[in-house]
Amino acid sequence: MGQGNDDDIRQRVLRGGRVAGAMVFECFSPGMPAILQQAGCEFALFDMEHAGLGYETFKACVAGCRGLPISPMVRVPTAGYTWLARALDVGAEGVMVPMVESVEQARLIVESVRYPPLGRRGAAFGMAHDHYAVGPVTDKIAAANRRNLVIAQIESERGLAVVEQIAAVEGIDVLWVGHFDLSNFLGIPGQFDSPVFDAAVDRIVAAARAHGKALGFMASDAGWVKWARDKGFNMVAAGPDHGLLRTAFAGLVGQIRATGAS
């Protein structure tokens, strides 16, 4: 897990480096971080927006990452100091916020996750987020401000309309395209081959590049991985976990049934 150096995920993605991870909606078991790390993931992004995940369970997920080269991150249900600061205090090294739709919202997010002088995050040290370690508080503040990744999801027509201004907010690190919601709010649900969807994504990509932000996406299959790479997304999560699990089981169960047919 990151300690605020040049090899941290945040520093790498902001330099344009490609980072691969997983988005987790259902599999919150203690062994999941190790399994994902063995699969090559560098981060695990646990979902609190849709999955019903609570802080105590997420804290256990963070503990499962401790000591492994995999960074625990979380998507909170909505923007707000309480959601964000608490997620960081229990050990998140990155936070994703859904439905970012204004400059004011983006600024609130940044203010909530950075310690002074960069923000207004409350102080509590010697806890989960700093691995219960002793040491100079000033060093811990500097490490956290440098390490913790801030992801803004652009997934509505409102966010799209001001994406350039959101991208310009200092402290927003990644613009993450929520493709299903974006298509829904554009009036073309699930029509990912639509020129309207393609133009919207291109606008987000251009905004990120113009302001030095990374680009994030969740890819559910090889086709989406290629699409994301071609568009220039450099922080890509495989997922969702339950979809990949279902696909893997369905393929194998299908083979078992076919083998057993008489």
Image (cartoon, grey):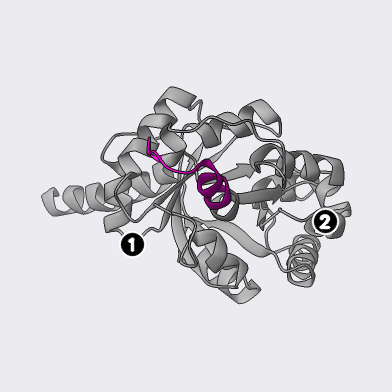
Classify residue 161 as left or right of residue 1: right
Q: What residue is shown at x 42% (from left), y 34% (from top)?
A: 128
Amino acid type of disc 2?
Val
Compare marks 2 and 1 and give the one earlier in the sequence.
1
Q: Quadrant of residue 72?
A: top left
Relative image position of residue 258 (x, y in whole percent): 19, 53
Classify residue 179 as left or right of residue 226: right
**Mark 1 neighbour class, 10 Å CA radius: few under 14, some 14 to 19, many 20 or more:** some
Residue identifier under label 2: 163
Mark count: 2
Residue 21 is one of the magenta-drawn residues: no
Classify residue 167 as left or right of residue 217: right
Relative image position of residue 3 (x, y in whole percent): 44, 54
Residue identifier under label 1: 40
Q: Residues under labels 2 and 1: Cα distance? A: 32 Å
Relative image position of residue 75 (x, y in whole percent): 57, 39
Q: What is the magenta range?
A: 131-144
Q: Quadrant of residue 230?
A: bottom right
Q: What residue is shown at x 82% (from left), y 56% (from top)?
A: 163
Do the residues under discs 2 and 1 have CB atoms within 8 angstroms? no
Classify residue 51 as left or right of residue 204: left
Q: Does dot 2 land on a helix, a strand or a loop?
A: helix
Q: Is residue 49 above or below residue 139?
A: above
**Mark 2 neighbour class, 10 Å CA radius: few under 14, some 14 to 19, many 20 or more:** many
On the question of residue 19 being in view, the answer is yes
